[in-house]
Amino acid sequence: MIVNVSRIIKIPDSTMELSFEEKINFIESSSGKIKLLKPINFTGTLVNDGKVLYLNGSLSTVLELYCDRCTKPVETSLSINIEEQFSSESIDEEEIHTINSGSEIDLTPILIDAILLNIPMKTVCDTQCKGLCPQCGQNLNEGMCDCSEHDVDPRFAVLKTLFKDSE
Ligand SMILES: [Zn+2]
Ligand SMILES: [Zn+2]
């Protein structure tokens, strides 16, 4: 989303409300493409403090991630606070974005970066997900396979010892 800030850029203390939806189908992450199931929704306020424009807002969207255990798609809602600074002078500070000569700022790369930074480290479809059999790939949520190497459920392990004692 390109935002034209010419209305507030020359007037200290002026503000500008932002509210938009931007439809993006995929974003590229270091581990591959990630599908966005909903448009990016953004609301925020730009404030000219006389030196820089401060942006304060929040974005929300829904990503399609995959269960780390069974690879099933998992709808993951994100809502992220955004705080950024913009200046039309090229200030030698990395965290201040430049406003181009047409008084425009492009929020899309900023929103995409924020999403990439906030992708959860772990995704599971269910805390009880049993995952896939490491040998045959069977989804163990759908049923057991014939491989023998599955970890014994600790509750059954206790029963086994009980039976042993009574023998
Ligand atoms: Zn799973
Ligand atoms: Zn198996």
Image (cartoon, rainbow, N blue to C red):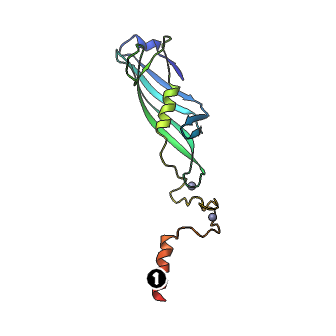
Q: Quarter of the picture for ligand 1?
A: bottom right
Counting the numbered discs, the total is: 1
- Between 149 and 12, which is closer to the camera in this rendering? 149
**Can residue 37 be seen in this snapshot?**
no
- Between 47 and 115, which is closer to the camera in this rendering? 115
State the residue at coordinates (53%, 44%): 76
User: Is ligand 2 less than 8 Å from the beta carbon at label 1?
Assistant: no
Q: Residues within 10 Å of mark 1 (few under 14, many from 20)?
A: few
Q: Residue 161: where, in percent of width, then height?
A: 46, 80
Tell me if residue 128 comes above or below residue 42 in the rendering: below
- Between 76 and 44, which is closer to the camera in this rendering? 76
Q: Residue 132: where, in percent of width, then height?
A: 59, 59
Task: Give the SS element for disc 1.
Answer: helix
State the residue at coordinates (51%, 70%): 153
User: Which residue in the rendered view is the most extreme toward the bottom?
Assistant: 167
Tell me if residue 29 comes above or below residue 17 in the rendering: below
Tell me if residue 30 comes above or below residue 71 in the rendering: above
Residue of label 1: 162
**Can residue 164 be seen in this snapshot?**
yes
State the residue at coordinates (45%, 36%): 80
Q: Residue 166: where, in percent of width, then height?
A: 47, 88
Q: What's under tag 1, amino acid-wise?
A: Leu
State the residue at coordinates (54%, 58%): 129
Say which quarter of the image contains residue 11. Answer: top left
Report whether 86 appears left or right of 30: left
Q: Residue 122: where, in percent of width, then height?
A: 49, 49
Q: Quadrant of the N terminus?
A: top right
- Between 40 and 146, which is closer to the camera in this rendering? 146
